[in-house]
Image: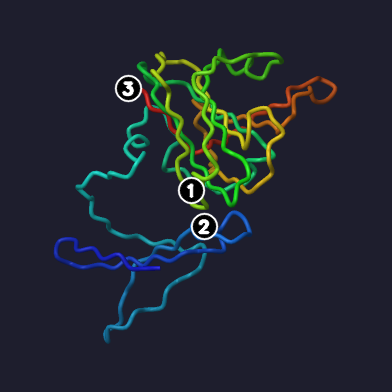
Amino acid sequence: MGVMVQNISGTPSYLFEADVVASAPYNLPRNVAHGYNFQPLSFNSDGSINSLNCDSSASFSVTLEQGTNSSTTAGFANVTGAADYASPDLDYYAECELGPKTFYQTWTASKAGRLTEAGVNVAAFSPTANLSLTLFRYTNDSVLLAPFYVWETLQQVDVPMTNLSTGFAVARIGVQNSTSVAVGDKLGLAVSNGPLGGLGVNVPMCYLLAYTSNRTSNLYVDGIGQVSPRGFNSASPVYEASGQVLKYYATVE
């Protein structure tokens, strides 16, 4: 909880911020993995503060002053300078099914050059397995779901469980020696709790998910250890989460 003070054109304004712990995505002890309430403060003639509006549907308009300093936060500049990414303007929701499920976030490269890194937002509470990230290139969406298809692995990394926290942060995968990509290449990031293709560990490991009409990216989902065809039509156990996207980015230089 706190108050941010701004001085726009010589007129001070005050923006109140408070934690909304009830919005946390899992019902366990937590400090960071929840939403926040922001609203401008207004004052009575005697200087006292008017009552806050804590309705969950309340919205407020505020005037913010553009900053001039560059951020030195590790990884921040990489995300904002990415070639391909999930729009920051979408409404993201915290979901916690990374454990019983593996996610394959795919996109179409919009820039030619050297693919240097990719990342996705992840949070966890007392994880008992590392986070596995695999960056890959594939031919097209149809063959990606076909039996026995083998993609081109560009890089694989395990993020140690000790590097994960209850606050959402970027889990990053750097590409050693970089990889040349062309406009239109189909790229993807496989995200799993434990070794890719393994049995997985069902612990609260969370990600940010949004709904979008952007068809340059697709999200595919598979249950951990699910490799057998499904149903009378022998459908792939991997299915498309239509209209959904993880909060990800990929940098091409």
Q: Position of residue 104 (x, y in %)?
A: 59, 29
Q: Secondary structure at mark 2?
A: loop
Q: Secondary structure at mark 1?
A: loop
Residue beneath disc 1: 168
User: Please, is residue 136 above or below residue 73 in the view?
Assistant: above
Picture quadrant of residue 236: top right
Task: Check disc 2 and give the amino acid type.
Answer: His
Task: Check disc 1 and give the amino acid type.
Answer: Phe
Residue beneath disc 2: 34
The residue most toward the left is 10
Residue beneath disc 3: 253
The residue most toward the bottom is 46
161, 196: nearer the viewer:
161
| x 62%, y 47%: residue | 96
105, 40: nearer the viewer:
105
Quarter holding the N terminus is bottom left
Mark 3–mark 2 CB contact (< 8 Å):
no
